[in-house]
Amino acid sequence: MSRIAKIYVDSEVRLDPLKGKKIAVLGYGSQGRAWALNLRDSGLDVTVGLEREGKSWQQAQADGFHPKKTEDAVKGADVVIFLVPDMVQRFIYREHVQPNLKPGMDLVFAHGFNIHYRLIEPPQNVDVYMVAPKGPGPIVRDFFVKGGGVPVLVAVHQNYSGRAMEKALAIAKALGGTRAGAIETTFKEETETDLVGEQTILVGGVMELMKAAFETLVELGYQPEVAYFEAINELKMIVDLIYEKGFTGMLNAVSDTAKYGGFTVGKRVINEETRKRIREAAERVRSGKFAEEWIEEYGRGSPTLKKGMEEAEKSLEEQVGRRLKEIIERGKPKS
Ligand SMILES: NC(=O)C1=CN([C@@H]2O[C@H](COP(=O)(O)OP(=O)(O)OC[C@H]3O[C@@H](n4cnc5c(N)ncnc54)[C@H](O)[C@@H]3O)[C@@H](O)[C@H]2O)C=CC1
Ligand SMILES: CC(=O)[C@](C)(O)C(=O)O
Ligand SMILES: [Mg+2]
Ligand SMILES: [Mg+2]
């Protein structure tokens, strides 16, 4: 067994370390909006900092913020939270944050990428810590509004004040994270596990497995609508059962035929070869090779990312999904 993780819950954590501090949230996208709203609702003093007027600016205004130019938000801040895309953070840091750094300021991240891979190297006289939600931004907001919270990871990279962990936990609490739990980790562990997870299961793995099953059924001549319900739509229900009741709970809800078929055939589809590939993905992340490749891709205008988005949008899965949207929406629970 590996060591047991330190997990903090709501009752152990205080907001005090951040009370009266001026917090600048840089970026108002998936995480930025959720953080700015949750922190404000928790009574903290939040200013949204953005590069220019545009979609994010309008959204922040519609939500009752008075956004400032990044530089101005940073100048007035004690705590600066980086919620712009990972590939953009180092430029924002160099142009607007570094020139305005004051000793004792806090630099906060939602993912360790830029610190772990040394794209940002802050001076010794600031605190550097992370609060990484283990869920997408809109869910971080939705759970909070409904009285819950998405679990978070917390880590300290630099502890100039001696109180960095207390402040990381205070942010975790204000975000709703400690309503679930805040797990102590390191920048290295968060960065590497997050990247391996999104590549091999959460984003890459799940999408490819769904596509492989859907497209194979269609190639075999089955109706795309039937294949869509089977290989894509029903996965949410199965994952929800696992989320609520674990593997055993899910297995108890499916037929014995499904259990037997699942136990015997699942291992033939996801096999030793698949595990080898997951290990390879982890090695690319751990060696920094993936980071290097992504930085290079971004430097060329993200052609692979753009192509992936276009292909996804045009795919048969998406066309069928759009056609079935009405049926799926009609059937959703009403409360
Ligand atoms: N999306 C998610 O649910 C999660 C994201 N994170 C981390 O949170 C951080 C923010 O990621 P997201 O919320 O996904 O970002 P996003 O892409 O949703 O939001 C980007 C924000 O930055 C602004 N922005 C975009 N490009 C810009 C540029 N070139 N210059 C200046 N501003 C620009 C946008 O206007 C928007 O306000 C990242 O470190 C990410 O790894 C961590 C956990 C989950
Ligand atoms: C939503 C999340 O946690 C991810 C998949 O790691 C991300 O968006 O980077
Ligand atoms: Mg993640
Ligand atoms: Mg991620």
Image (tube, helix red, strand yellow):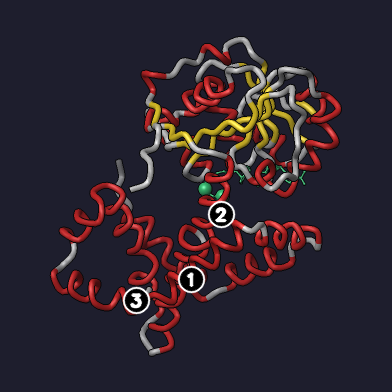
- Residue 102: quarter of image: top right
Residue topped by disc 2: 195
- Quadrant of the image for the C terminus? top left
Q: Is residue 57 left or right of residue 31?
A: right
Residue topped by disc 3: 226
Location of residue 110 with respect to 160 vertically, above or below: below
Q: Amino acid at mark 2?
A: Leu
Q: Is residue 118 left or right of residue 135?
A: right
Distance in Å between CA atoms under marks 1 and 2:
17 Å
Position of residue 263 measured from the top left corner of the image (x, y, whole percent): 23, 72
Residue placed furthest toward the bottom: 220
Location of residue 35 with respect to 307 vertically, above or below: above
- Which residue: 83% across, 32% down? 96
Q: Is residue 124 left or right of residue 153?
A: right
Distance in Å between CA atoms under marks 1 and 3:
18 Å
Position of residue 224 measured from the top left corner of the image (x, y, whole percent): 41, 79
- Which residue: 53% across, 44% down? 190
- Residue 60: quarter of image: top right
Q: Earlier in the sequence, mark 2 or mark 3?
A: 2
Q: Under 8 Å from ligand 4: the CB of mark 2? A: yes
Position of residue 54 measured from the top left corner of the image (x, y, whole percent): 75, 40
Q: Is residue 245 left or right of residue 279?
A: left
Please say whether residue 245 is visible from this viewpoint: yes
Q: Amino acid at mark 1?
A: Glu
- Which residue: 80% across, 58% down? 299
SS state under label 3: helix
SS state under label 2: helix
Residue topped by disc 1: 208
Q: Earlier in the sequence, mark 1 or mark 2?
A: 2
Asked if labels 2 and 1 touch by Cβ distance under 8 angstroms, the answer is no
